[in-house]
Amino acid sequence: MSESQTFAPLSGGCITDVKGWRAAGVACGIKKNGALDLALLVSDRPASCAGVFTTNRFQAAPVLYDREAILADPRGVRAVVANSGCANACTGPEGLEDAREMARLAGRATGVDTNRVLVMSTGVIGQRLPMRSVAHGVELAAAALSADGGHAAARAIMTTDTRPKEVAARLDIEGREVTVAGMAKGAGMISPNMATLLVAVATDASVAPGALDGIIRYAADRSFNCVTVDGDMSTNDTFLLLANGAAGGREISGPQSEGYQQLRDAVTYVATELAKMVAFDGEGATKHVTVHVTGARNRAEARQVAMTVAKSPLVKTAIYGKDANWGRIICAVGYSGVEVEPEAVDMWLGDLHLVHNGRPFQVDEVRASQILAETDVAITIALGMGDADVTVWTCDLSHEYVSINANYRT
Amino acid sequence: MSESQTFAPLSGGCITDVKGWRAAGVACGIKKNGALDLALLVSDRPASCAGVFTTNRFQAAPVLYDREAILADPRGVRAVVANSGCANACTGPEGLEDAREMARLAGRATGVDTNRVLVMSTGVIGQRLPMRSVAHGVELAAAALSADGGHAAARAIMTTDTRPKEVAARLDIEGREVTVAGMAKGAGMISPNMATLLVAVATDASVAPGALDGIIRYAADRSFNCVTVDGDMSTNDTFLLLANGAAGGREISGPQSEGYQQLRDAVTYVATELAKMVAFDGEGATKHVTVHVTGARNRAEARQVAMTVAKSPLVKTAIYGKDANWGRIICAVGYSGVEVEPEAVDMWLGDLHLVHNGRPFQVDEVRASQILAETDVAITIALGMGDADVTVWTCDLSHEYVSINANYRT
């Protein structure tokens, strides 16, 4: 933790550690295997909301629905209902009606106006939501809502995830305890662009929608937009940030407000930790891979180089095979589309300096094997062109990835 | 064969079916397993030459060498020496000197001026060429040169390829028999951009360098630039087109010359068939996948959509798993970066019309399974926006791909 960090991670925390939120996760038969598949989050008072969404041209019905709902009333959100097992994507006007009905059912069950309910869905594309199961699930979830239901809700949005993803932090703003906590799901079809996966982050700070929008974009850019599993961008990526003001205190209205930067840092921390969990729980992952790019002319180019390396099937399979085939990394840097100067490029695997000025340097195969035997693998690429840098997170490409995705629907 | 096709495929043909060319393929110990690893092609007279090369910023030494040699004398090429097992990439000035020395050795062994020898290398990046083995190989190959050595040469450039790739065609230009024949290697790190892999195509037509340049660019755009295995673009991609005039007849000086279009079509045919062989011999491939995109606003957008689908790990693993998960195809169309109109998109798997106007249509799972049980799988995407179309070729993503690339150097 850096000295300037003005929040504290909250170990074992979940979204219901944020004041004023109750949650539940239930099983209602959308997934064939009987696992939890419907989550409900309810705030005891209206929350400001900002969202970032997939840039895929095929936008799932819940994405279309939420965009409109937030625009219509960015201060009035009371609940989020989410399901796994069916993405409600490529389902046309009927799918949009299903999303609306899902909100209506959740509103009725929790005594909240339909317009104040957001929806999220994840799972197979091109199938209609089984609305009878959804209706049943909403009833069950409304009855199960509790102030410690956050963990169950986080489990209920999982698909091929092997574990739930929850992060929480506490901070002090003008003498009041503020909590930021979130949950995410995602393990495949991961290559977000200005948005990602399914993520809900809540805070009990009081924040105006415009300020919240600035915070979510800053956080998304440094977290979910810096992870990739397979380079496939989903139709359903949704990241919601909700602030219900239950902690009391003055509203944070913009960047100049007391607490703005502190809250932004805490939200970015929560989002970044969730993003890393997503990358490191990538389908079939056996390795946590971190790619640092330094010395770029600007942040966009740094990210482009880092993401090209992080997405390369050849780099990912080499890491899976514990093969220090650094030529594949340099090759990916070269085809990233950024005009790098080969003779200015340095590269490290962990602390092993493999490439200096574009040429092999301390190529110590024994040491390289030791580094690749660890679960956490760091690749650092110094471009020697400027002072912008970026960090992205990914995983390796294993036999298990192929198995999971060859048999996803069966 | 279409009626307008004015050439005939030459079954079982190889590069030495072109008049005036001799070739050899030998084993000289660059590959540890004792397989053929050095190829030599020699023309009995100077040949015009055009090349297209990788756009990777890290260009291998042979690429740098050939670019210069062709510029210096585009009418004087007499020989090409190629090795597999070592890419001579990321090897700095010493690597460039090794490429020069390889040309020098081949020139001396065949009695040809060094400046008239081109070089190609493929294999592991970042290692120096074992020059003692190369010298030995060049001697062996020069002694083995023969008018039916084309098949051995094609074998000597293989790396993870499971079979050699050779295509030949015959045509008649102004009453003279002209042959076009080529060989290619490539199975992984395949995502060319204005060039590809290692490819040598020779013809005994007489062609000016400028006309040859037009022909190679036309052919590359419709062949090697339309295949992908894994989206990784190599440091070594090289496509050489050589015309030695041994068939006699007037020189083809430009598009208006008699025989230009005919020759261009024959070269495009040879290149396209080689490209398909590369895609369908993709590392670990169990399926030949053809992606047709129609109704695009222009060819570039058609290609972008087709390549995005062809590169998607989720589409490729679904095809491997014989899972008609068409939602993944539509999803990839959506994130291709082309501004498609979802409600105008149709999609077919073989002849099964799965998506109409962006929504599920004749989703017949039984028929879909039958289609996916075949080796050849065709995906057609109609964008409904214009009249440009493109076809690209790829393969599926299998457990075997991961095995090959996790253990490539061991």
Image (cartoon, coloured by chain):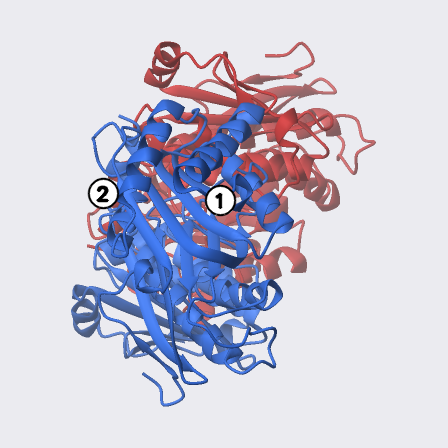
Chain colours: A red, B blue
Q: Chain of mark 1?
A: B
Q: Nearer the viewer, residue A403 or A250?
A: A403
Q: Residue furthest right?
A: A256
- Crowding near the residue tagged with mark 1, few <14, some 14–19, many ≥20 C-alpha atoms within 10 Å: many
Q: Is residue B362 above or below residue B204?
A: below
Q: Quadrant of residue B407?
A: top left
| Residue drawn at the location 33% of the way across and 57% of the way down | B279
Q: Same chain for marks 2 and 1?
A: yes
Q: Is residue A278 visible?
A: no
Q: Quadrant of residue B324?
A: bottom left
Give the structural element (helix, strand or loop) at label 2.
Answer: helix
Q: Nearer the viewer, residue B121 or A2?
A: B121
The CA distance from mark 2 to mark 1 is 40 Å
| Residue drawn at the location 63% of the way across and 12% of the way down | A2
What percent of the width, then of the height, locates residue A108?
45, 58
Residue A195's disc is none
What percent of the width, then of the height, locates residue A276?
47, 29
| Residue drawn at the location 36% of the way across and 90% of the way down | B3
**Three-letter code, disc 1:** Val
Is residue A111 shown left or right of residue B8?
right
What percent of the width, then of the height, locates residue B280?
28, 58
Q: Is residue B5 visible?
A: yes
Q: Nearer the viewer, residue B287 or B269?
A: B269
Q: Nearer the viewer, residue A369 or A17?
A: A369
Q: Residue furthest front?
A: B111
Q: Where does the C terminus of chain B fall, quadrant-wise?
A: top left
What percent of the width, then of the height, locates residue A249?
73, 29
Which residue corresponds to mark 1?
B117
- Foreground tag (2 vs 1): 1
Which residue corresponds to mark 2?
B399
